[in-house]
Image (spheres, grey):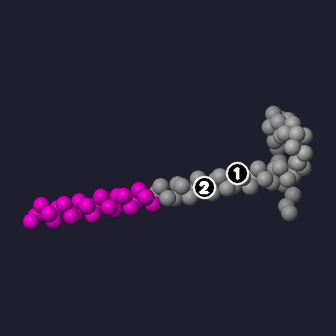
């Protein structure tokens, strides 16, 4: 495990401490789970953005091919 020093806003720290006292979970475990959850969320966002970009490229390509087919039909 790595040691990390971080600064937490007072309000966030206070809220976290209140929650921890209710759920009886060590602060370290809680923060690790929170970071893991946030990492998952960010990975999903990155995948969604990549898929959106790929979809746009495919869409543009499909429209180009469709246009070429229409030109061929117009020539006949």
Above or below — where is 72 with respect to 56? below
Q: Position of residue 56 (x, y in %)?
A: 41, 56
- Residue on which disc 2 sits: 44
Q: Position of residue 54 (x, y in %)?
A: 45, 60
**Residue 64 horizontal side relative to residue 21, left or right:** left
**Residue 75 horizontal side relative to residue 47, left or right:** left
Res 70 label: none
At x 14%, y 63%, the residue is: 73
Magenta span has 71? yes
Marks 2 and 1 in Cβ contact (< 8 Å): no
At x 28%, y 61%, the residue is: 64
Query: Foreground residue, 16 or 9?
Result: 16
Q: Determine which quarter of the picture holds residue 9.
A: top right
Q: Main secondary structure of the magenta part?
A: helix
Q: Which residue appears farthest toward the left when viewing the image?
A: 76
**Residue 52 horizontal side relative to residue 31, left or right:** left
At x 23%, y 60%, the residue is: 67
Q: Residues in magenta?
A: 54-76
User: Label 2 vs label 1: CA separation?
Assistant: 10 Å
Q: Element under label 1?
A: helix
Q: Position of residue 40 (x, y in %)?
A: 67, 56
- Residue on which disc 1 sits: 38
Q: Position of residue 41 (x, y in %)?
A: 65, 52
Above or below — where is 33 with respect to 65? above
Q: Is residue 13 visible?
A: no
Q: Residues within 10 Å of mark 2 (few under 14, many from 20)?
A: few
Q: Element under label 2?
A: helix
**Residue 48 horizontal side relative to residue 29, left or right:** left
At x 32%, y 61%, the residue is: 62
């Amino acid at each position: 495990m790595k040691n990390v020093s971080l600064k937490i806003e007072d309000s966030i720290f206070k809220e976290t401490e209140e929650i921890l006292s209710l759920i009886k979970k060590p602060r370290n475990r809680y923060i690790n789970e929170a970071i893991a959850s946030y990492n998952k969320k960010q990975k999903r966002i990155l995948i969604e953005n990549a898929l959106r970009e790929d979809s746009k490229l495919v869409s543009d390509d499909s429209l180009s091919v469709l246009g070429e087919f229409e030109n061929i039909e117009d020539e006949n």
